[in-house]
């Protein structure tokens, strides 16, 4: 079958059949006892996906149970290295929320996109020299999306990085983006695509 001949209905059917939690594979990469951790990882996966295992999907690709509710959480793993790798994230618009989806992509580019002029890169890396790498990403799914901010830094700078990220998010929520900044972000976004 050629890609040109694939219909929208065929793609929807494929997603409905294949992209289900019970057909997913989980991988754990860590310095742990394999036998001991296997049961623990399986239990965590079953608890997390239990409610999404059985409901059928509706015609628009959304889970019949609606958008999943996710509680914020923090998980800290102490490793034997000098660097902290952190992710801050939350739910975002789904693949089917086109206006919100495009705005989220543009916002992620402004905040921590692949360019040196992103707000978080300027603030954490250039101005304060706290982070080796910082980026914002958005992944849309059929029923919801995920937006995430990733950064790495020395352990002693983690809290300061989180504070600066929260300040930048607060500024985006309370202060208008200048027309010039918005135009630059749109041009960069178009160039990326």
Image: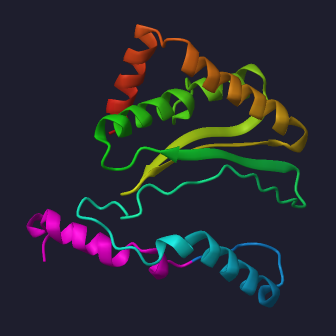
**Residue 150 location (% of width, % of height):** 65, 44
Residue 179, above or below 85: above
| Residue 182 image-quadrant placement | top left
Left or right of residue 191: residue 157? right
Q: How is the image coloured?
A: rainbow
The single residue placed furthest to the bottom in the displayed view is: 35
Left or right of residue 122: residue 39? right
**Which quarter shows the N terminus?**
bottom left
Residue 81, above or below 1: above
Q: Nearer the viewer, residue 31 or 24?
A: 24
**Residue 156 location (% of width, % of height):** 91, 39
Highlighted range, magenta:
1-25
**Which quarter shows the C terminus?**
top left
Left or right of residue 52: residue 170? right
Q: Can residue 27 be seen at all in this image of the molecule?
A: no
Residue 52, above or below 187: below
Name the residue rendered at 64%, 52% in the picture: 71
Is-magenta flag for residue 142?
A: no
Name the residue rendered at 69%, 22% in the picture: 167
Q: Nearer the viewer, residue 152 or 23?
A: 23
Is-magenta flag for residue 10?
A: yes
| Residue 23 image-quadrant placement | bottom left
**Residue 185 location (% of width, % of height):** 42, 23
| Residue 88 image-quadrant placement | top right
Q: Can residue 145 be seen at all in this image of the molecule?
A: yes
Name the residue rendered at 47%, 77% in the picture: 53
Name the residue rendered at 34%, 50% in the picture: 95
Q: Total number of numbered labels?
A: 0
Chief SS of the magenta region? helix
């Amino acid at each position: 079958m050629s890609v040109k001949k694939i219909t929208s209905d065929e793609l929807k059917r494929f997603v409905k059949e294949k992209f289900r939690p019970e057909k997913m594979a989980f991988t754990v990469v860590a310095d742990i006892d394999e036998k001991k951790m296997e049961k623990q990882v399986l239990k965590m996966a079953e608890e997390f996906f239990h409610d999404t295992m059985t409901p059928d999907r509706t015609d628009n690709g959304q889970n019949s149970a609606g958008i999943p509710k996710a509680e914020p959480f923090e998980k800290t793993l102490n490793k034997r290295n000098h660097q902290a790798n952190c992710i801050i994230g939350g739910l975002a618009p789904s693949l089917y929320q086109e206006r919100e989806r495009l705005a989220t992509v543009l916002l992620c580019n402004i905040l921590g996109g692949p360019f040196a002029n992103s707000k978080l890169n300027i603030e954490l890396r250039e101005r304060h020299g706290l982070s080796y790498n910082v980026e914002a990403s958005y992944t849309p799914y059929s029923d919801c999306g995920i937006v995430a901010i990733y950064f790495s830094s020395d352990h002693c700078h983690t809290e300061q990085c989180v504070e600066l990220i929260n300040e930048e998010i607060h500024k985006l929520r309370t202060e208008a983006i200048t027309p010039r900044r918005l135009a630059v972000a749109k041009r960069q976004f178009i160039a990326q695509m």
